[in-house]
Image (cartoon, rainbow, N blue to C red):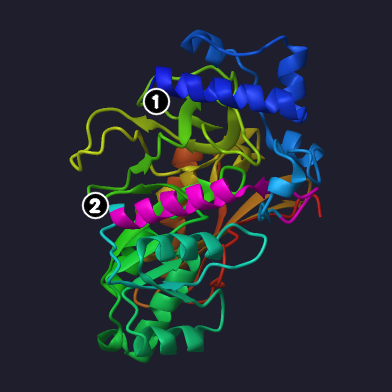
Amino acid sequence: MQISDVQLDQVNTQIGRLIASDNFYGRRLREAGITGVSSVEEFQRLPFSEKQDLREAYPLGLSAVPQRDVVRIHSSSGTTGTPVIIPYTQKDVEDWAIQFARCYEYAGITADDRIQITPGYGLWTAGIGFQAGAERLGAMAIPMGPGNTEKQLQFMMDMESTVLTATASYALLLAEEIEKRGIKDKIKLRKLVTGSERSGEKIRQRIIDALGVEYYDIYGLTEVYGPGIGINCQHGHTMHVWSDYVYVEIIDPDTGELVPDGEWGEIVLTTLVKEGAPLIRFRTHDLSRIVPGACPCGHNEHPRIDTITGRSDDMMKIHGVNVFPAQIEEILSSFPELSSEYQIRLSHLDGRDTMRIYVETNGSVDWENLRMRVAKRVKHRIGFTPLVKIVELGVLPRSEKKTRRVFDERYD
């Protein structure tokens, strides 16, 4: 999708504000002698911004407005390194709520719905975004926050919640508890909206089957408002991204060059009207592609990106081979005997790296035969044989937040 003249004008406004604020990106532009862009080519020559840039701006070096105009801060959910602090103006908060309400509308959610919100509240841009969008829409928000599954299920029944918002991991945990307790007939859910972690087709289908819901996935990241800058519509998994707030590019993560629409690469985002902390050409490291062609929903003013397959910085290197968790998940999903849950553990034993894959199944299959077939298929795909361990359904941990699936113990 080529940047439009309107979007170029918005970028120029942002460039002027960034230079005037003298924040990290404004200084970078000034040092490069850039005062604006007049063409697509000039825009594509603008320097990227990275997560490390944002960390180095701690605490409030990202701000492009006077401190008195900042009404809220949020921080990314990462647990390591210097936090990234994102300041929001009142307009930013309102714009985020508008975008989130639009997500709900694309999912067919209305003011008559009751939205049970389980993502966390606080510095993380999760629960508060889901709630602001619900209130903007005029729906009833039930702000549960994470955890306390017993209370979640009780409120789900008593309040007759029609929409559940959660990480895919917690939605799976709730779905399994509902099945275990035999209370599906007491649950009124009709829609599920997940975000903040990638979910494969197998886990999606497991949740859909257990809850009997329509499944929607939102896109977003703290650095760019938060969750809610895009969502899939009722015509598939591809997500519309709100082009009046964010401009999307897809680049080759190794070269930084743009790739044609339809080709996979790394998502790069530019905020078009954000005030508190505008970002230009921000490398997200999320891997996807722009989906060419018209969408049956008719909202073709907002470009579509495909389901996020992982992150360019998720790559594992073992035996000289580059491996992504999504590759392992795709292989495992091809076995109907396996559940959607898995773990990958990398260790260094007897002078060599080892990959162990833990997967769940029920007791009605030949575990040894299954183990060998999984190992063989992984070797065929990535070139070396992992150690595969089959465990009973429910043995691997479930999470109330994001599920950690890769443990690299080689450097512990």
| Closer-to-camera residue (135/311) | 135
- Mark 1 belongs to which amino acid? Glu
Vertical side of 124 occupied by 90: above or below: above
Instruction: Name the residue at 51% across, 31% down.
Output: 272
**Residue named by callout 2:** 234
Q: Amino acid at mark 2?
A: Gln
Occupied quadrant, residue 135 = bottom left
State yes or no: discs 2 and 1 in contact (Cβ < 8 Å).
no
Q: Is residue 285 above or below residue 86?
A: above
Q: Position of residue 23 (x, y in %)?
A: 76, 31
104 falls in the magenta region: yes
Instruction: State the residue in front, 323 or 228.
Output: 228
Q: Is residue 393 left or right of residue 65?
A: left
Segment tinted magenta in the rendering:
79-105
Q: Is residue 272 visible?
A: yes
Q: Is residue 335 visible?
A: no
Q: Residues within 10 Å of mark 1 (few under 14, many from 20)?
A: some
Disc on res. 263: 1
Answer above or below: position of 158 versus 194. below
The local secondary structure at tag 2 comes to: loop
Location of residue 320 in the rendering, given as x and y in whole percent from the top left corner: 65, 33
